[in-house]
């Protein structure tokens, strides 16, 4: 399989390594986890019929019931396949990592595992790469060759812009994905003004936020005067990390931001998964799938 002559030998090696590692993770550790969490959640409306003993009362169509005077339920049929869309933030803040791994590399691996899991379940996978604008869109398709392309694009892509516009990325998803899809939004969420668009997207799609972070963004070492630079704006700030009050204030601010972010996801009905650069994350992903499966009770979702 030609992974692209435009890739440097070093990047090509990284792409191949991620392909091998993530495919093995899916095969060895995640067999069944993805299907349990997502299969049966994609449903299409088929008809309305009279209520029968044993029917789930959550499926009652109250409008038809009121009109006819008899209880009716909505019948759905399971879609044969799901559409999975990976929306990956490729802004410059992803080029940060304090433990030999950049956030953007971790995002690529998580996206690769999700893509492999979807392909193994015969689902279609698409990709959106977004900075402060949508820079690349790969429509959903099936097949191993397509997954390899998705991984290659995430790792090898060089964005033309540094900033972040999650609102614009979510608006693009709404335009290109008309039918209900499983959407994973992978980002560090260092952006403003996207919250309402997230709520709109969550009403249409099965949406999960994958928050990619690094502990050094909230826990600075006591290393003297450090000059910090915003990767997207270039703004610089000197911080005295020997001052315990400074380090404590930074941790408190990060904690409040994390709590506010989680509250936003909960209020929008969005799933949340957090991963840290340079730290094991596959157990977190499996745990997320299992919690989701228990939440649905193995039954039909929307």
Image: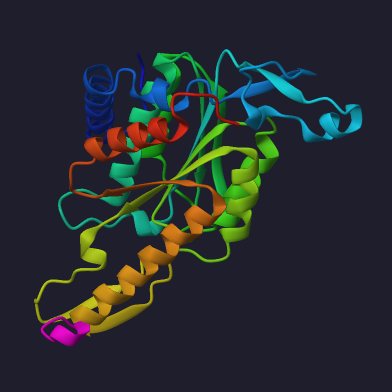
In the rendered view, would you say 222 is above or below 57? below
Tell me which segment is drawn in magenta.
240-246
Q: Is residue 213 left or right of residue 39?
A: left
Q: Position of residue 273 (x, y in %)?
A: 36, 45
Quarter of the image containing the C terminus? top right
Taking 251 as reference, is 246 above or below it?
below
Q: Residue at x 43, y 15 (%)?
A: 121
Residue at horizontal 90 percent and vertical 26 percent from the top: 68
Q: Depth check: give the residue in front, 204 or 190.
A: 204
- The picture quadrant where one finds residue 148 is top left
Query: Can residue 4 be seen here?
Result: no
Which quarter of the rendered picture does the N terminus lie within? Answer: top left
Of 205 and 296, the residue lying toward us: 296
Q: How is the image coloured?
A: rainbow
Left or right of 65, for residue 54: left
Number of numbered discs overlaid on the protein picture: 0
Position of 182 with respect to 179 (left or right) is left
Residue 204 position, x and y percent, is: 65, 39
Foreground of the two, 240 or 245: 245
Q: Residue at x 61, y 18 (%)?
A: 54
Q: Is residue 241 magenta?
A: yes
Q: Residue furthest right?
A: 67
In magenta segment, residue 78: no
Measured from the top left, where is residue 7 in percent x and y?
33, 32
Is residue 265 shown above or below 225?
above
Rendered residue at 44%/24% (across/down): 298
> Is residue 178 shown above or below 140?
below
């Amino acid at each position: 399989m030609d992974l692209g002559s435009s890739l440097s030998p070093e990047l090509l090696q990284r792409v191949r390594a991620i392909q091998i590692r993530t495919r093995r993770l899916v095969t060895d550790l995640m067999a069944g986890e993805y299907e349990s969490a997502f299969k049966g959640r994609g449903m299409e409306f088929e008809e309305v019929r009279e209520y029968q003993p044993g029917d789930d009362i959550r499926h009652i169509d109250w409008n038809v019931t009121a009109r006819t005077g008899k209880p009716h339920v909505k019948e759905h049929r399971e879609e044969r396949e799901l559409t999975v869309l990976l929306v990956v933030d490729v802004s410059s803040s992803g080029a940060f990592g304090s433990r030999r791994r950049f956030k953007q590399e971790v995002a690529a691996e998580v996206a690769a595992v999700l893509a492999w899991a979807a392909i193994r379940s015969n689902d279609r996978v698409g990709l959106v790469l977004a900075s402060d604008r949508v820079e690349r869109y790969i429509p959903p398709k099936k097949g191993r060759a397509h997954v390899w392309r998705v991984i290659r694009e995430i790792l090898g892509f060089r964005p033309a812009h540094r900033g972040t516009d999650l609102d614009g990325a979510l608006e693009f998803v709404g335009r290109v994905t008309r039918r209900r899809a499983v959407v994973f939004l992978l980002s560090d969420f260092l952006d403003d003004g996207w919250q309402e668009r997230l709520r709109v997207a969550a009403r249409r799609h099965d949406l999960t936020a994958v928050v990619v972070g690094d502990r050094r963004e909230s826990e600075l070492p006591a290393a003297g005067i450090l000059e910090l630079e915003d990767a997207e704006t270039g703004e610089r700030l000197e911080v005295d990390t020997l001052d315990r009050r400074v380090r404590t204030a930074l941790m408190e601010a990060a904690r409040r931001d994390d709590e506010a972010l989680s509250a936003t996801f909960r209020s929008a009905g969005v799933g949340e998964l957090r991963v840290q650069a340079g730290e094991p994350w596959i157990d977190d992903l499996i745990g997320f799938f299992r919690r989701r499966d228990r939440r649905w009770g193995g039954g039909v979702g929307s």
